[in-house]
Image (tube, grey):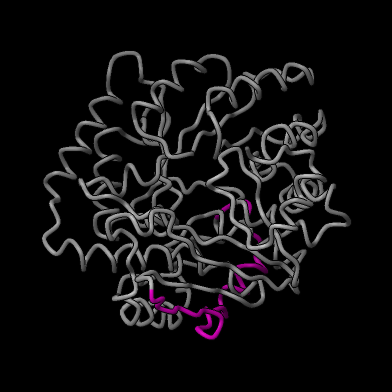
Amino acid sequence: MIITSLLDTDLYKFTMMQVVLHQFPGAEVEYRFKCRNAGATGIGDLAPYVTEIREEIRGLCNLRFQDAELAYLKAMRFIKSDFVDFLGIFRLNEKYVNVTALPSGEIEVSIKGPWLHTILFEIPVLAIINEVYFRNTQKKADFGEGRRRLDTKIGELQAEGLGALKIADYGTRRRFGKAWHEEVLRTLAGRLGTGVQGQFAGTSNVLFAMKLGLTPLGTMAHEYLQACQALGPRLRDSQVFAFESWAKEYRGDLGIALSDVYGMSAFLRDFDMYFCKLFDGARHDSGDPFQWGERMLAHYAKNRVDPKTKTLIFSDGLTVPRTIELYHQFKGRCQLAFGIGTNLTNDLGYEPLQIVIKMIRCNGQPVAKLSDTPSKNMCDDEKYLAYLRQVFEIASPA
């Protein structure tokens, strides 16, 4: 079985789930799967593995949180005891997930049900699809090549003048496999070091954070801000509503705002002086990262906030060379963090699957993101997308 623990997921699933339990327990949602490189020379032809994927999901739905796992979560300063009590009786229900083979060779995955009971599906289901695909298509995987590539990355990070550059692992959902993921983390922690003096800041994966003594990292994801399009008082205020609801839950903790659900310009319009001071920083996940960083620093200065007291997190398709470029541009001007995903956990010489599971509906109405990278948008209702662009003053793509 690929997933053997419900902690084998990203921390932000738990931080968002706690908000759902306390503030939106009745919300109903729908998620949809997409393979962005489907059809390219057979990449993404997952239909032959549907039975295997379903069996793995069935195993996932038989898991319960163990006492040691609950104790680990409860020890986190921002996790509340009633949420841990809820997790103690929680289990994923297979009836909320449907996996279908399509004539094109692709698959359709739909997750539909109460948000509180479906939010934990995304990451393990993506990890399952990845591992099933690669163990069938690469039966004798070249781990030697993976280790050589990882060694090169570590060498680049250990170059002179980069001692303060810290990276984190954000690669659970698109990893080559669970065992390889663990090997990568052990190697990074051992070679780069952890803690204040180390260059490996931690991982988004809660299970491996617990198992390997690493720092678990994460705050919010796109689905949270998207759901607020249906849960807030009115659409135009949905981003503000999302940030205020987050602050209500965490009282200044976990203060990294995601900036690209409506694009950077719309984010800056809503991220006023109050939020600039309240939140610890912002995360980049689409568009040009260098332009984004410059705009964020200028925005802080405009709102009379010292950028050096704030953190910019870069997490969009990063490679080590791109990370080093960004570090050189912004070091000393603000606090910096870098989350590297696929390029750490699925770089063995094979083309990775560009797969996502995104929320497309909440309480029966469409929800979407309009990121600074148009290919990342995902919505099946063009009229709603047009309305969203109008409300948030976003130009239509050329």
Q: Picture coordinates of residue 190 (x, y %)?
A: 25, 39
Q: Residue shown at 63%/35% (left/top)?
A: 282
Give the residue at the far bottom of this rendering.
95
Is 142 included in the stretch rendered in magenta? no
Q: Residue shown at 59%/56% (left/top)?
A: 378
Q: Nearer the viewer, residue 372 or 387?
A: 387
Give the residue at the far right of this rendering.
233
Give left or right: position of 23 versus 188.
right
> The N terminus lies in which quarter of the figure?
bottom left
Give left or right: position of 194 versus 259.
left
Q: Residue shown at 75%/71% (left/top)?
A: 363
Give left or right: position of 45 versus 248.
left
Magenta residues span: 76-103
Q: Picture coordinates of residue 356 (x, y %)?
A: 48, 58
Relative to 158, is 52 above or below? Answer: below
Is 96 included in the stretch rendered in magenta? yes
Q: Picture coordinates of residue 213 (x, y %)?
A: 37, 49
Q: Residue shown at 59%/50% (left/top)?
A: 377
Q: Nearer the viewer, residue 207 or 238?
A: 238
Give the residue at the far front of this rendering.
398
